[in-house]
Image (cartoon, rainbow, N blue to C red):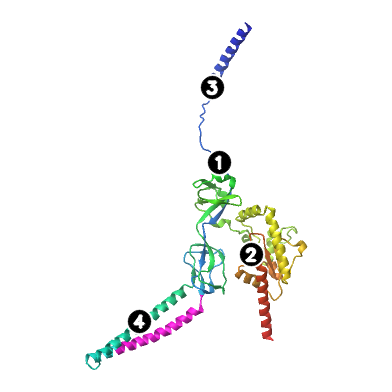
Amino acid sequence: MRCGRTMRRLIAVSILAAAAFAANAAGAETLTVALRPVADEKAVFATVESISVVPARGRIGGTIVQLNVREGDPVTRGQAIAAIGDDKLALQMKSLDAQIDALQAQSSQAQTDFSRTEGLVERGTLPRIKLDEARTALNVAENALRARTAERAVVQQQFNEGQVLAPAGGRVLKKLVAVGSVVLPGDAVAMIAQQDFKLRLRVPERHARFLKAGDKIRVDGAEFGEQTSKSGVIDLVYPQIEDGRVIADAVVAGLPAERGAAGLAAVFVGAPSVRGRPPILPRYLDLDYWLARDSVPFTHSSNLVAALDAALAQAAGSARMLRTARDARWLRQTLRARGMCVVAPEASASPAVTTIALPAECPSLEIGEALEHRGYEISCRSAYLAERNWIQIALMGEYDCRALRELPGALAATCSGYTCARRAKASGEL
């Protein structure tokens, strides 16, 4: 009996609860639940880069007599950026001009002889065989003149090809030669970054499976000093993963390619000297230090953030640091064995930078430029290095181990050449 009453009470309570829920639902707002895609945006680092870098090559061999551009200059397709001179071409032109003058005289004389012989043959004074001989001599003279004229045209074309033309419109990234450098046919004179720019993304490899061509991207307008955002489309995903990152190129309309260039120091050029600066101001932020010495400014480009990120990723392992320290120790020992003056003692030497004090007869800037022409890039142009006649060999980035092994010998040979030249000059003056 009690069980029966309890069951009836539960049923009654359930009916009342259902009726109350139905009444509340009737007065509530109707909501629709549907499936739709949601953009899962992730912030990634990207740089504005040129699609490709092409070399401007010389078409003939010779000596660079003129260089019309420097790093950063804009160029157009077909613009002459350098001139190669070859003294032999000028001598060949003079020789061919003299030969052409002589052949023109011979051709004129042959034409006169032919006309005279033709008249005598018609009057029966000379046999017809003489006319054939005169005609042959005239043809030989005319053909020789045409051959020399064609040779001169070839030399003139070679002379014209001494102009080194930009293969594409863009900006000069790097000059590879200087005025007076000797080049061979096909040698690169400068590297040109094409004007067409893309946005290059570097995405962690864990996102590689979500990245594909055709995906849309959004670029904040604040990155370019604008109010509205820019949109683009990924058109290429590179198959190789570098430093744990997937690289992809995106097309974005109206990329301001020059906004990433370093230029903070240019804002302060010509500003009055800052006095009373804090003594603990870091050197790389001290603009007054640069203004007072007219030296290279310590600017910081936003594009270098990507390079810093890659450098940190590469230097994270201890193997890289151990290799750099080992190579730097070998470099210092080899330089000392060759009689070079390494500035820092071994106990406090940096594994990334080796500073060398050159003798007075070896100007640091000239030695650095001579090594640069031989393919070795060292530091020599900073004001504090030039004042002390120092050069520096830096192992902070990627370097060629084979070139590093050859560098001490190349440096010693270059310095020895300068020393011998100075001594020979001094002996000649005496």
> Disc 1 versus disc 2: distance between alpha carbons?
47 Å
Q: Residue at x 62, y 72 (%)?
A: 370
Observer-side mark, 3 or 2, equals 2
Please say if the residues under marks 2 and 4 sit with CB atoms less than 8 Å apart. no
Of pointers 4 and 1, the one earlier in the residue sequence: 1
Above or below: residue 67 compared with residue 120: above
Question: Which residue is denoted by mark 1 in the rendering?
Answer: 40
Magenta residue span? 85-113
Q: Residue at x 67, y 82 (%)?
A: 424
Using the image, tell me which numbered label, if any, was put on residue 402.
Answer: 2
Question: Which residue is denoted by mark 4 in the rendering?
Answer: 143
Above or below: residue 326 compared with residue 150: above
- The kind of secondary structure element at disc 3 is helix
Specify the amino acid type for callout 4.
Asn
Specify the amino acid type for callout 2.
Arg
Above or below: residue 65 compared with residue 123: above
Q: Check disc 4: other Cα within 10 Å, few if <14, some if 14-19, many if 20+.
A: few
> Disc 3 versus disc 1: distance between alpha carbons?
34 Å
- The kind of secondary structure element at disc 1 is loop
Question: Which residue is denoted by mark 3 in the rendering?
Answer: 25
Of pointers 2 and 4, the one earlier in the residue sequence: 4
Please say if the residues under marks 1 and 2 sit with CB atoms less than 8 Å apart. no
Figure quadrant of residue 5: top right
Specify the amino acid type for callout 3.
Ala
